[in-house]
Image: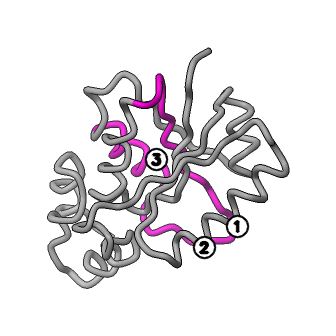
Amino acid sequence: MKKTAVFPGSFDPFTRGHENVILRALPLFDEIIIAIGINAEKKAFFQVDQRLQWIKQVFAEYPKVKVEAFTGLTVNFCKQENASYILRGLRTSADFEFERSIGQINKQMHPDIETVFFLALPQYTALTSSIVRDIIRNGGDASAFVPEAIAHSIKNYKL
């Protein structure tokens, strides 16, 4: 049976921390779907199409990585994609508490889907998409915090 994991998030924008989790998880799975969740109640900084394009560029050399957008519950998207795993990165103990609660509820709803946690490497524990957005919003250079394939585009991004 194919081992497929879904790595859900808003990825607004996708950071080096996100990239690192995927690269470290690749040996464990046959396929990883980076799933951009669309929340109609949240105003995104970058358009979904832009985020999809950027992440596809980052993993263009990795055939085991797919990038898709979805709405609704992550576990329902997993069922739709025949994925048995949800991949999550943890930076802090607060992340753990939040993700543990979601993972336990997901397990109750779909017992056949496992949540797999990856601890962030120390250099990524302070890195969040919110911080990167704030840097960009205020005219700073965020290129050190996003994958190279995204850095040039973000540097020239016009809000």
Relative image position of residue 35 (x, y in whole percent): 54, 44
Q: Earlier in the sequence, mark 3 or mark 2?
A: 3
Circle 1 sits on which residue? 101
Question: How many angstroms separate mark 3 from mark 1 (CA)?
Answer: 30 Å
Q: Front-most of 50 and 73?
A: 73
Position of 6 with respect to 104 (left or right) is left
> Badge 3, how many Cα within 10 Å: few under 14, some, many 20+?
few
- Dot 2 amino acid type: Glu
Q: Front-most of 18 and 98?
A: 98
- In this view, which residue lies farthest toward the right? 109
- Say above or below: 107 vs 10: above
- Say above or below: 82 vs 128: above
| Residue depth check, mark 3 versus mark 1: number of the one nearer the observer | 1
- Dot 1 amino acid type: Ser
Question: How many angstroms separate mark 3 from mark 2 (CA)?
Answer: 31 Å
Circle 2 sits on which residue? 97
| Residue depth check, mark 3 versus mark 2: number of the one nearer the observer | 2
Question: How many angstroms separate mark 1 from mark 2 (CA)?
Answer: 6 Å
Taking the magenta stretch, the answer to whether it contains residue 48 is: yes
Circle 3 sits on which residue? 49
Which quadrant, please, contains the N terminus? top right
> Where does the magenta region start and end?
28-57
- Does the residue at mark 1 contact the one at mark 2 (Cβ under 8 Å)? yes
Residue at 28% x, 66% y is 124
Which quadrant, please, contains the C terminus? bottom left
Instruction: Name the secondary structure under disc 1.
Output: helix
Residue 155's disc number: none
Residue at 76% x, 36% y is 112
Relative image position of residue 45 (x, y in whole percent): 44, 69
